[in-house]
Image (cartoon, rainbow, N blue to C red):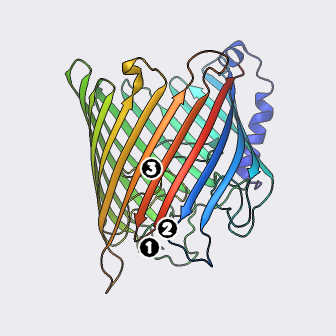
Amino acid sequence: MKKTSLALAVAAGTLGASSMAQAEFIKDSKASIEARNFYFNRDLRHTTAAQQSKREEWAQGFILKAESGFTEGTVGFGLDAYAGLGLKLDSSDERAGTNLLPNGFGDEGPGEYSEATATFKAKVSNTVLKVGGLMPKLPSVSSNDARLLPQSFLGGHLNSQEIAGLTFDAGQLKELNQRDSTDFQDLSVNAAGGIRNFAFSGKGNQGDDFNFAGLSYKWQDNLTTAYHYGELEELYKQHIFNVVHVLPIADKQSLKTDLRFARTTDDGRSNIDNKYFGAMLTYALSGHSFGLGYQKMSGDTGYAYLNGTDPFLVNYVQIGDFASKDEKSWQARYDFNFASIGIPGLTFMTRYISGDNIDRGDGVAEGREWERDMDIAYVIQEGPLKNLGLKWRNATMRSDALGELDENRLILSYTLPLL
């Protein structure tokens, strides 16, 4: 792990926090450990005999999270901590590269890896400042937790909820630790996984700090609007607008509308230029949900976001994000919660996404792609195995950008409260 001035500041905060023995600091503390067993299999059907034909690995992860309360007084202080351990159960040189473990094709990597961060926090009224290890979940930047260990950042994040219904966020991220890495790295743009048409000068696809700010206002229980700004210094600036409305229709019936628009431009050392529009309509009836989504990219490039994070796109799914240059895509989705028929804990989801009009360059026919996903999940509700979660995720993708992929993920997880 890199030694940065920020990390040293966190260490100093940790030493200071050790003397905090006040009642609220202890009483409001909580901690848990999650055991996550993950099997990943991706069949690369488009490759030749000389290339990697399959990525297949099995690993066991342990995720410890601890959060203190705040000390008493006008300004309260606290400390959070995160630690992760990944253990290799099965891998090989020919099957590596699933992002479960720190390895790649031709090198199955170490048998284990670990990481840890600390976060110093201060609170005044309903405003909280956190400095150190962060896992933000915002439209402008959202930490990815789709593998063995979560992605994390080093930086500062201010969250304020002083006015009823209004949430304000602002901060700066300095470095990130990818989900299959133990080292903090410089920030960059996600330029893989599609046809983006990005071009970079100077230091290439490597930015400086990531600055973010945003406002979200809940007008009524069923209506929320939001604006968020993100800037990866020297590479891109992004403005994101979002409206979410839920219309009650009748008993156990509703229609949810989720509208999104983003404008992204360069910040000096890139050609990034993108307009994004997305819409998702979801009709809910008892345990059933039926969704229709549409997504459109326009401009000189595809959609830009921080490497490895979850982009704020309605058609960002298990494998693809359908965010290539000029791409248009639609989605049909169905969810069912079996609690509505007396089987709590069991859920099912399936969706189909189709994209076309991808700009593949001069003289090349426009690209197309489609993906079909299915999730089946069950959380045991009682008995000695209560809260044990089991999930099967299956996906098939056929893409001019990504190739032909068949994928299965089997995930067992159990979270044990410690405090």
Between the residue at mark 1 and the residue at mark 3, the CA separation in whole angstroms equals 19 Å
Circle 2 residue: 191
Q: Are marks 1 and 2 in contact (CB under 8 Å)?
A: yes
Give the Cα separation between the discs numbered 2 and 3: 17 Å
| Res. 32 image quadrant | top right
**On screen, 399 above or below 348?**
below
Q: Do the residues bearing badges 2 and 3 touch, measured as CB atoms within 8 Å? A: no
* Image coordinates for residue 196, horizontal then vertical, percent: 41, 70
Residues under labels 1 and 2: Cα distance? Answer: 7 Å
Q: Which residue is mark 1?
A: 198
Q: Secondary structure at mark 2?
A: loop
Kindly identify the amino acid type of the residue bearing the numbered disc 3: Ser
| Sooner in the amino-acid sequence: mark 1 or mark 3 | 3
Which residue is at the front of the view, 371 or 207? 371
Q: Amino acid at mark 1?
A: Phe
Task: Name the residue at 73% across, 66% down.
Answer: 93
State the residue position of label 3.
140
Task: Indicate whether 267 appears above or below 377.
Answer: below
| Front-most of residues 253 and 145 | 253
